[in-house]
Amino acid sequence: MAEEARRSLYTNLFLAGELPALLDRLDEAGVETIAYKGPTLALAAYGSLALRPFGDLDLVVRERDFARAKAVLAAAGFTPAIDDFAAVRHLSHEQAFEARSGRLQVDLHGRLFSRELFPVALEPFLSRRVVVRVGEREIATLRTEDLLVVLCEHAHKHLWTRLVWLADLAHLSAARADLDWEATRELARATGSRRVLGIGLVLAAELLAAPVPEAVLAWCRSDAAVVKLSAEVRGRLFARLPEELVDLELSALQWRSRERWSDRIRYALTPNESDWMVRPLPARWRAVYYVVRPFRLLAKYGLQPLRRLR
């Protein structure tokens, strides 16, 4: 454990040391950037770069600046981490880059929320941003009230499979005694993330004693779906499920966790990398995926209960 802690600290220090120069390059190109997760989360929630492992740097820019930010990274020696998906990058709002023989990894985001949700403007988050001091440099990041919702959406996207994501919520809650919980709830309502936020806060409070106010927990549990879904997530938090079962449950959880039918329909119809992998097509044929996706999901998941029963 001590060796793993040292290795994690060295990685964290290396990445944190590379962040300021990278932000300077983006700033010189006129690209306004927010750094979140990574070193800013470690310092804001845990108070130390040694206490929260991370393996890359996450940067979010306006969608209109995405191409310019990619050019800045390319000029700095970064290359796309997954070249196989070059023809399908239009289906994603993020792209991974790497440099230094893979030691330095950057995830560039054009949105804070998944494409399956209706677009959420970045401008309000930029206007509410705060700074975290990383070494001698002040780095712009999300305010805690916004970060809680964003982190819950990220954990939800990956089926809440890592306990550390709940620890982040618990430590963020503890680090800010003056946290504006009403602002967090309002953002969750506006973005259709109420159930997702509820799952995260309920689990963080139940498993890790996160200091979430009782009134906020009562608001979370007032939705019966939150109570049921959080119990399901908790029950399989450390379960090792077959890959096909994970896929099935991921889709079901994503569907049931959206309180707005508009988001459910958008989730069902929005293509992703999996659709491209089934039948790779050039970018000019992207519209085909919107037609094919419902039938692919029906073929993959609609018959899954029969397969499991057999």
Image (spheres, rainbow, N blue to C red):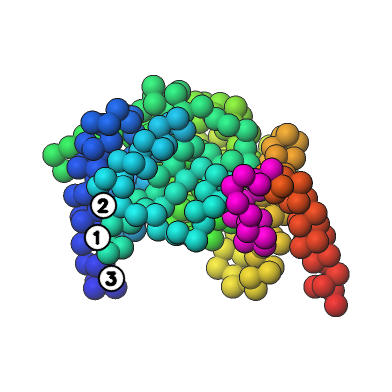
Comes first in the chain, label 1 or label 3: 3
Towards the viewer: 197 or 18: 18
Q: Is residue 92 above or below residue 101?
A: above
Would you name the residue on which mark 2 appears?
77
Q: CA distance from mark 3 to mark 2?
A: 29 Å
Q: What amino acid type should be assigned to the residue bearing mark 3?
A: Glu
Element at label 1: loop
For image coordinates 30% across by 52% down, the residue present is 78
In the figure, is residue 42 to the left or right of 229? left
Element at label 2: loop
| Residue 216 spot, x, y in % from top left | 56, 34
Would you name the residue on which mark 1 appears?
100
Q: Which residues are magenta?
A: 271-287
Q: Is residue 277 magenta?
A: yes
| Residue 49 spot, x, y in % from top left | 25, 52
CB under 8 Å between callouts 2 and 1?
yes
Crowdedness near tag 3: few (<14), some (14–19) or many (≥20) residues, C-alpha within 10 Å = few
Can I make out residue 164 in this image?
yes
In the figure, is residue 262 to the left or right of 38? right
Towards the viewer: 41 or 296: 296
Q: CA distance from mark 1 to mark 3?
A: 22 Å
